[in-house]
Amino acid sequence: MTCNAFTFQTLHPDTIMDALFAQGIRVDSGLTALNSYENRVYQFQDEDRRRYVVKFYRPERWSAAQILEEHEFALDLQCDDVPVAAPLAFNHQTLLTHHDFCFAVFPSVGGRQFEADNLDQMEWVGRYLGRLHQTGSKKRFTHRPDIGVKEYLIEPRQLFETTTLIPASLKQAFLSAVDKLIDAVMEQWHSRFNLLRLHGDCHAGNILWRDGPMFVDLDDARNGPAVQDLWMLLHGDRAEQRMQLEMIVEAYEEFCEFNRTELALIEPLRAMRQVYYLAWLIRRWDDPAFPKNFPWLCSEDHWRRQTSIFLNQVNVLQEPPLALTPIY
């Protein structure tokens, strides 16, 4: 994103209604805002009582070509019977524009929250991730980026150096912790994996349950290692995570072979996500929604805790990676 100060203050309800009306959709209900800070997403019902979701993309984050790759991936998955929320086409176009905003309309799929502690549901998700990656491996994104240390570590480190949101008295200790974390990640990071199209942000909040999993929100789709879509489902202590991983991989491999050398990337990817998330909050701070919803970002206690979290992750990176039972 090149325009970090952009806000959605000009996206009024009337603007949204007009954008939908231009596509032949008459809104017959209120617009219910869904939980999204990066974009603006609303659920509504039309005059025929059909339910939809409209997503207005944050300008300057993704190019039109990159958004269209997200849509193409979703439609590829849909064609392969992978349960995913895919955009609807209007006059053969899925990416629509109105008043300089890019937007897309999706069917409202509904469903319950995926239960991360439900092992039966976990097995289903592993199976469908195998199918998702089977489709994702057919080709790569050409406009969307690859998951890598430059975007997730090096560029955030440069941002931390210049931001005024980190209290001056704590900045040096924080930057020192970031540097140690980057060094620890670089020692573990490797490229012995096949790049494939990923969901990219496959955590429990992006999976609905409707007699099986339904994957939503491909906004962070990128090329990367398969394990990126698996590790965020793991939780609990090490023994619990190993049991979950065994179950996920066994189900996954019904459709797609899993490269076990990628297990060494789980903790580096966790560290990269931690760093990238903080940088994302800083980049979006001029959007009024962010100070309102993340007021703790300015507190000294937060930066002390974050320094401690990073140093703890350095220690975790020194431990042997999570492993599966050997195959003979």
Image (cartoon, grey):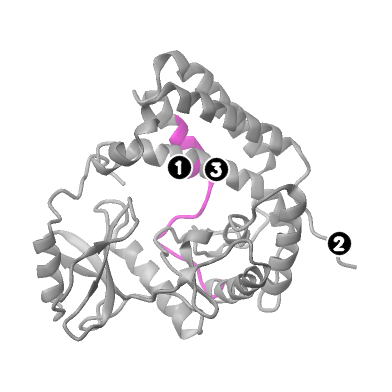
- Which of the 4 quarters of the picture holds residue 310? top right
N-term-proximal mark, 1 vs 3: 3
Q: In this rendering, is residue 213 above or below 115?
A: below
- Which of the 4 quarters of the picture holds residue 320? top right
The residue under the point 84% across, 61% down is: 325
Furthest toward the top, the residue is 169
Amino acid, disc 3: Met
Residue that mark 2 sits on: 326
Residue that mark 3 sits on: 272
Disc 2 crowd rating (10 Å Cα; few below 14, some 14-19, many 20+) is few
| Residue 154 lies in the magenta stretch | yes
User: Which x, y percent locates residue 233?
Assistant: 60, 58
Q: Are marks 1 and 3 in contact (CB under 8 Å)?
A: no
Residue that mark 1 sits on: 277
| Residue 142 lies in the magenta stretch | yes
The secondary structure type at the circle numbered 1 is helix
N-term-proximal mark, 2 vs 1: 1
Which mark is nearer the camera, 1 or 3? 1
Do we see residue 202 in this rendering?
no
N-term-proximal mark, 2 vs 3: 3
Q: For this view, does 5 lie left or right of residue 80?
A: left
Q: Which residues are magenta?
A: 137-157
